[in-house]
Image: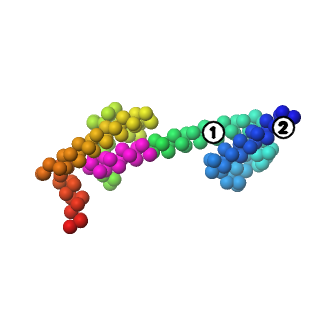
Amino acid sequence: MTTTINTQSLHRKLMILLKQNGYSSDDRHDLVYRLTNGRTQSTMGLYFREMIDLCNWLEQNSKSATDELLLRKKRAVVLKIAQRTGIHDPEDWSKFNNFMLKRSILKKPLKNYKYKELNKLIQQFRQLEQNYLKSAEKPFNKAWWNEGRKRAHLN
């Protein structure tokens, strides 16, 4: 009796994980079919151990996808600030890459920063942006000219 209850609750968990990870009915059947080497297409036909393995795999996949999404958001913050301050031009990455290797806080490419390190890098870029905006108030320096070019189309 308890094995049936455990199997049912595990199956319920499996179905929730499949739904959270965006698997359609066809995708789910294909995944189960490949997992069981063609033995079954139904999640109900999975052995208890197969359900546990699939749940663990889905949880790990979900976690890594979420982590990647968080990294992308933090990298996007850095890139936005870099664009606003003239360090990054979307058409030419060389200036930005050189800046990252020579002047960023850990002196490495943006893609090599870990999640916790990105917080320090964002802090550096925010400070850099504040300094840039302060400089833009003083006439005839680089920041002032760049800000003037941005506003030229308003006239």
Mark 1 surroundings: few (<14), some (14-19) or many (≥20) residues within 10 A: some
Q: Nearer the viewer, residue 95 or 10?
A: 10
Mark 2 = which residue?
A: 4
Residue 81 horizontal/vertical position (percent): 32, 47
Q: Quadrant of the C terminus?
A: bottom left
The answer to whether one can see residue 80 in this image is yes
Q: Main secondary structure of the magenta part?
A: helix
Query: Which residue is situated farthest in the right direction here?
Result: 1
Helix, strand or loop status at disc 1: helix
Q: Is residue 22 magenta?
A: no
Which residues are drawn in magenta? Answer: 73-88
Q: Disc 2 or 1, which lies upstream in sequence?
A: 2
Is residue 38 left or right of 23 when viewed as pictured? right
Residue 76 horizontal/vertical position (percent): 40, 47
Residue 27 horizontal/vertical position (percent): 68, 52
Marks 2,1: beta carbons within 8 A: no
Query: Which residue is situated farthest in the left direction here?
Result: 140
Is residue 54 left or right of 74 when viewed as pictured? right
Q: Nearer the viewer, residue 39 or 21?
A: 21
Q: Residue at x 73, y 50 (%)?
A: 29
Q: Quadrant of the N terminus?
A: top right
Mark 1 = which residue?
A: 59
Residue 130 position by quadrant: top left
